[in-house]
Image (cartoon, grey):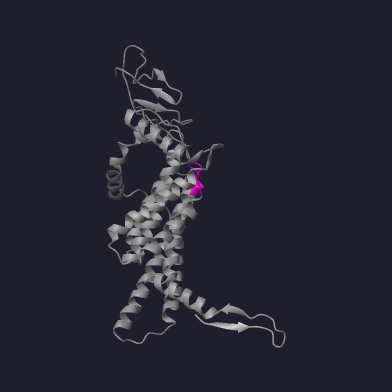
Amino acid sequence: MTSETIGTAGTGAPARRGFDTDFIGDGFAWLERTIRPNEGWVAAGLLALNLVVVVMSVERADWVPSPNLVALLFMAMLTGLVLYRIPIWSIALLPVGLAVGLAIILWQLSNFTINDVTINGTGEVIERLDLWLDAARTGSISIDSLPFSFALMVSTWLTGFLGAWLFLRYGNFWGVFVLGGIGLLSNLTFLPPNTVFHLGFYLFTALLLISRVQAIRRKHEWERRSVKVDDHLTGLSLTDSLALTILVIVVAFLLPMAPKWGTANDAYESMRSPLETMEDDFNRLFAGLPARRPIGFRIWDNVMALQGSIYPTTTQVLWVDSETELYWKARTYSTYNGKGWLSEHTVT
């Protein structure tokens, strides 16, 4: 570091020492080179935009009051950006990123307000999570919104941190698409059809990211082979990719809706079938969640949580031919605990 004497000639004023701004500039340049992604900042920006679309879809659904999920996503990605350059075995750094995320989540929830009630510190957060776990173990009902808010924040942190980690450390963008795609499709499944805009923008950013990464990797390959590459080639490639992506997305959304393809629908249902066994537990453990679209059915299990109105359809499910008019009892809910109804010793 150099310095220079600053004073007023002939006045006897004391001299002042100033810092060399070149040193500060060199420091920022070194930091930028150190953490710069291998695929460049444009690709990293597209990655961030792709994941932001997923998180914004969840935020706009407004399932439960939560701290700003987009800000949490950026903090998670920044943590991944800082850690990925440390030359240590990955298995040793991943717990660090997860621990940082847990600390930030607990800190944000510790003074957050849910349903006009302010949470009184981290101790209350842990206590309410413990009560939720107790309800899960005992088969009871939980209407507390905090556990679901906590789950959303944990999912957001994992998506941002692991997505950035996979992309920056290993150049793997498919893992990013898997994390984001699962979150987006899971959210859109329970939302009205007019929210499909998020899916379109998600696909748009995903296609741009793939094009950008492939262009950068091809440029690096040519440079390794000592092939002269025009500096404008990367910019032209991004422009062409942008135009092609817009064309593909517009055409896809303008095409008429085709009937369900039996093979694809059967494959989707087979993948979803393991989750169906968890729906009754999900409904009783997150009974406080609102319905974002009309529900035409009710899961008649041992627990019937109060979840708002249902909208029965006219679909015939049973036909009985009997000489005597009878009431057909399927299940009796005889116990009310303030959160829902419980069925005990029902004969079906």
Query: Taking 266 as reference, is 283 above or below it?
Result: above
- What residue sits 58% from the left and 78% below the top? 18
- Looking at the picture, tell me which residue is in the foreground, 72 or 233: 72
Residue extent of the magenta highlight = 59-67
Please state which of residues 154 and 296 is positioned toward the viewer in this rendering: 154
| 63 magenta-colored | yes
Look at 50% across and 78% down and name the residue there.
Answer: 23
Residue 82, horizontal then vertical, whole percent: 40, 64
Depth check, front residue: 48 or 238: 48
Foreground: 84 or 190? 84
Is 27 inside the magenta-drawn segment?
no
* x 41%, y 52%: residue: 101
The spot of residue 247 in percent (x, y) is 45, 66
Magenta segment, principal secondary structure?
loop
Q: Which residue lies furthest to the right in this view?
A: 11
Let me know if residue 173 appears in the view: no
Which corner quadrant holds the C terminus? top left
**One can see residue 327 in this view:** yes
Q: Reply above or below: 262 against 301.
A: below
